Structure formats: C-alpha cells, structure tokens
Image: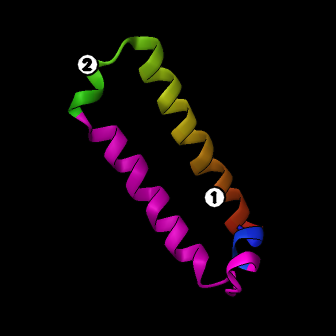
Amino acid sequence: MRRFADTARLPVSPLWPMVTEMTDRTVAAWETLDEKNLMPDDMRKAIGEQIMTVARSISQAVTQ
C-alpha cells in the first residue's frame, strides 16, 4: 500500500479505510455468490483461500 501511495503521491492513511471496505465487500460477495458452485471444487477452494489470505493480510496491516 505504501508503494502505491508513494507512486500516486497520496497519503496512505485515507486509503486504508477504502481498502478495508473493499476487502470486506469482496469477502461478503464471495461467501454469498451462488455461481461459485458451478466451479470445480479445487478451483473454488483456491479462489476462496486467496480471497481470505488477502483479507487477513489487509487486516493485519491495518492493525499494525
């Protein structure tokens, strides 16, 4: 996040609430997405794990 903010010449602190909200919305959308059941189990599991890993990373970065 810091690199993005520095490149865009933006302060990083206003970006965290936006990133957190987007992450929460992504997790919620994935959990309720009916179409994900059309995917093979291994693909659905991999995508779900990736979404959760990113969400945890964002959560940890915000609390530090």
Spot occupied by residue 6 in the image (x, y as percentages of width and height): 76, 79
Q: Is residue 53 magenta?
A: no
Spot occupied by residue 27 in the image (x, y as percentages of width and height): 42, 47
Residue that appears at 68% across and 68% down: 62
**Nearer to us in this view, 57 or 40:** 40
Image depth: mark 2 or mark 1 in front: 2
Residue that appears at 77% across and 69% down: 3
Q: Is residue 57 left or right of residue 46?
A: right
Q: Is residue 20 magenta?
A: yes
How many residues crowd around disc 2 within 10 Å: few (fewer than 14), some, or many (20 or more)? few
Q: Closer to the N terminus: mark 2 or mark 1?
A: 2
Secondary structure category for the residue under label 2: helix
Residue at which label 2 appears: 38
Spot occupied by residue 63 in the image (x, y as percentages of width and height): 71, 67
Judged from this view, the residue extending furthest toward the front is: 7
Magenta residues span 6-33
Spot occupied by residue 8 in the image (x, y as percentages of width and height): 67, 80
Spatial separation of the CA atoms under disc 2 and disc 1: 29 Å
Q: Which amino acid does label 2 sit on?
A: Leu
Residue that appears at 66% across and 83% down: 13
Secondary structure category for the residue under label 1: helix
**In which quadrant will I find the N terminus?**
bottom right
Residue 10 position by quadrant: bottom right
Residue that appears at 54% across and 76% down: 17
Residue 45, placed above or below residue 54? above
Residue at which label 1 appears: 59
